[in-house]
Amino acid sequence: MAVKDRDRFSTTTRIRLLGEQTAARVYRSQTRRQARRSRLTGRAALLALVLCSMVVALAYPMRQYVSQRADIADLQRQRRQAQQRVEQLRDLKARWQDDAYAEQQIRRRLHYVKPGETGYSVVEPGPAERSRAERGTARRPWYANVWDGVDKSDASDQ
């Protein structure tokens, strides 16, 4: 028995027992951590799956929403532009209903003069390389140029 007791209290035996106990504790703690990790990993995977499915389910409606909001903004911009154009045309219509404005525009655009007035037309000098025919048409009244254009187009058809 003395040998057994000596064996039991020897340093090597004690170290070996301590190593086995420590290994057992480490093994138990690792299995607990792994069990916790696997539970958290499963939960995380489920959460990720739910989030991904929600993103996929909401992606198309969100894209439609953003697209429709852009369309609405574009239509509102077009409506504002159309309203501005309507206002401009109303102003122009009101101006044309004024006889003084109509007379002013007729005189300016058609070069009309009242009896007893002298009409002047200012012609800007053109480049020197203009042909003689082009210079001659600039000095003529506008209606003569129109008739010449009609005659030329009629002559080209024959």
Image: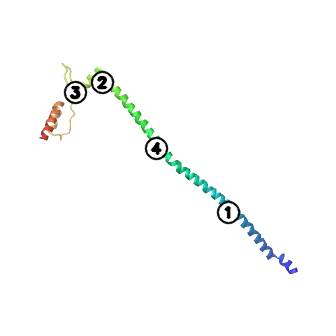
Q: Are marks 1 and 4 in contact (CB under 8 Å)?
A: no
Which residue lies under the disc numbered 1? 34
Q: 68 or 136: nearer the eye?
A: 68
Residue occupying the point 18% across, 31% down:
142
> Which callout, 2 or 4, points to the residue nearer the camera?
4
> Which callout, 2 or 3, points to the residue nearer the camera?
2
In 3D space, how far apart are the residues under numbered discs 1 and 4 (Cα atoms)?
48 Å
Residue occupying the point 37% across, 29% down:
86
Residue neighbourhood size for the residue with mark 4, other residues' Cα within 10 Å, grouped as few (<14), some (14–19), many (≥20): few
Q: Give whichever of discs 1 and 4 has the lower sequence position.
A: 1
* Residue type, numbered disc 4: Ser
Q: 63 or 96: nearer the eye?
A: 63
Q: Could you tell whether 3 is left or right of 141 in the image? A: right
Which residue lies under the disc numbered 2? 96
Which residue lies under the disc numbered 3? 110
In 3D space, how far apart are the residues under numbered discs 2 and 1 (Cα atoms)?
90 Å
Check the image and report above or below for 45 versus 147: below
Which residue lies under the disc numbered 4? 67
Q: 148 or 138: nearer the eye?
A: 148
Image-quadrant location for residue 9: bottom right
Q: Secondary structure at mark 2?
A: helix
Q: Are marks 2 and 1 in contact (CB under 8 Å)?
A: no
Q: Are marks 3 and 4 in contact (CB under 8 Å)?
A: no
Residue 104 lies, in percent from the top left, at: 26, 23
Check the image and report above or below for 158 versus 113: below
Q: Give whichever of discs 2 and 4 has the lower sequence position.
A: 4
Way the structure is coloured:
rainbow
Residue 49 lies, in percent from the top left, at: 58, 54
